[in-house]
Amino acid sequence: MFSLASIATMSACIFLFGLFFAIVTNFQAMVKEAESGVAVTVFFQEGISNEQIEAIGKEIRQRAEVSDCKFLSAEEAWAEFKEEYFKGSEEAAAGFADDNPLANSASYAIYMNDVSMQPVLVDYLKGLEGVREVRHSATVANTLSDFNSLIGYISVGIILILFLVAIFLISNTVTTGIAVRRDEIGIMKLIGATDSFVRAPFIVEGILIGLIGASLPLVLLYLLYNKLIVYIEEKFNFLSNLISFVPAKGVFHTLVPVALILGVGIGFLGSRITIRKHLNV
Amino acid sequence: MIKLEHVSKAYSAGIPALNDVNLEIEEGEFVFVVGDSGSGKSTLIKLLLKELEPTEGVITINGRKLHTIGHRQVPRFRRNLGVVFQDFRLLKDRNVYDNIAFAQRVIGASVRESRKRVPQMLSMVGLAAKYKSYPKQLSGGEQQRVAIARALINQPKILLADEPTGNLDANNAWEIMKLLEEINERGTTVVVVTHNMEIVRVMNKRVITIKKGVIISDVNGEYDED
């Protein structure tokens, strides 16, 4: 009876954990998406040769925090500018004829693996020979970086609370089990049972509670997640342009082993701690 | 086989339950330990089982000094001792067969070994026909027989019985004592703690009397309570 109550509460804890994990995974995917669009732009000094620009590009690409480095020539920059600002009044742009007003605007757009590394990268780029200007948005980088940290802290906090609650529950179940089976344990010890022989049934019980308590909510979450994504995408069509959900496989690929290890770990720890406390074996 | 040298045991209050006890029991002996309630008899059994540690003195059983046995080695040590209690201490949710086989499982014996040994023990204690019965379906005497079978299945060299007839009527008490005598005749050293002076007188065995934690007499046969 107590085992059933423990499984139910453990399931509730793992369900909450799974729910939170799915939300965090989706948030992180969105943040990552946003991060991938944050670039640092490097402009070169006048009169620099193409070979020098290539050498700078090679050096930048070798850095660990750099995921991509795209070169934009002065001609491409002017073409992009015209496309953006002279659309519909191409004759105004034609006035420039072959005189490229952005002649000195060849640049590298540098993308990072981790936006929190932006200040380090910017310092490095400013120190490079031939670099005239480094443009970046510290606010965007900082906001994304802070948001990532916040998600990390909340995750750790919630996992810790769930972990403690679940250990407390398992501990209660095992304490009751010990009280009920105190006579049996006493007999075992007098007959010559080893400590591990006495502990084993309680540890196995704890692990089973953890395993079952983790498996049930995982199945439920999997079914719910798939249904929820389809529902949101169908009912709130406008959202699909703003956000994209991580597919179930992507979430559960990590969630399943983590939740199972967590369940088994909590079951094992909860029962072992309690046995040590209540049983002098 | 069992040797106590200047053994004392005091509980937290400081009053000694046993005081400077010296005692030697040889292999194959049948010994009664008698005394009033609170005289220290049960403390003696607990010391022999290494449930308690003596405050002073040395206890040697089967050639091993108990203070040299570490916590992890206690289970193996206890397998050399069979124990029987006044309240039988059977597992109520298991039948006779399983109660006896449980002792084999505890020491890691194979199922095949149990299937061979349990029927032997059942016939020795005269309960072969009741192997499927549960403790509550048995009389007190029968329950004690199951407890004795369980204590002996792992072939201990020593059997400790703490008031084994305390919960039994006269007939059952005598049957249990006869069974213990038979077990002793097969070579097991038997130590019986009891209140039952009639049994002690008639059995004509060695009797150790404890009073207020001190051995006041140790006589062989023809026990005189005075």
Image: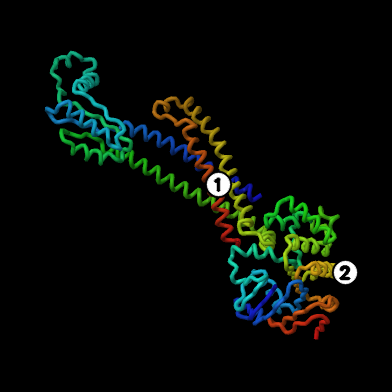
- Given residues A115 and B196, the one toward you in this image is B196
Left or right position of A279 against B24: left
Chain of residue at mark 1: A
Estimate the x, y position of residue B98 in percent, counting from the top left. 75, 54
Q: Which residue is rendered at x = 56% and y = 51% of the image? A: A268
- The crowd level at tag 2 (other Cα within 10 Å; few <14, some 14-19, many 20+) is few
Q: In terms of secondary structure, where does tag 2 sit?
A: helix
Q: Which residue is rendered at x = 74% and y = 68% of the image? A: B159
Pick out the residue farthest to the bottom: B226
Q: Amino acid at mark 2?
A: Asn
- Given residues A100 and A271, the one toward you in this image is A271
Tell me whether the residue at label 1 lies in contact with that at label 2, contact meaning CB atoms closer than 8 angstroms: no
Asked if residue A92 is positioned above or below residue A188 in the image, the reply reads above
Estimate the x, y position of residue A238 in percent, counting from the top left. 42, 25
Q: Could you give the CA–CA distance between mark 1 and mark 2, rounded to whole angstroms? A: 54 Å
Estimate the x, y position of residue A138 in percent, counting from the top left. 26, 38
Quarter of the image holding residue A128?
A: top left
Q: Quadrant of the C terminus of chain B?
A: bottom right
Asked if residue A184 is positioned above or below residue B55 in the image, the reply reads above
Give the number of the disc on residue B171: 2
Quarter of the image holding residue B16?
A: bottom right
Asked if residue A39 is positioned above or below residue B222 in the image, the reply reads above
Give the number of the disc on residue A264: 1
Q: Are marks 1 and 2 on the same chain?
A: no
Left or right position of B13 against B121: left
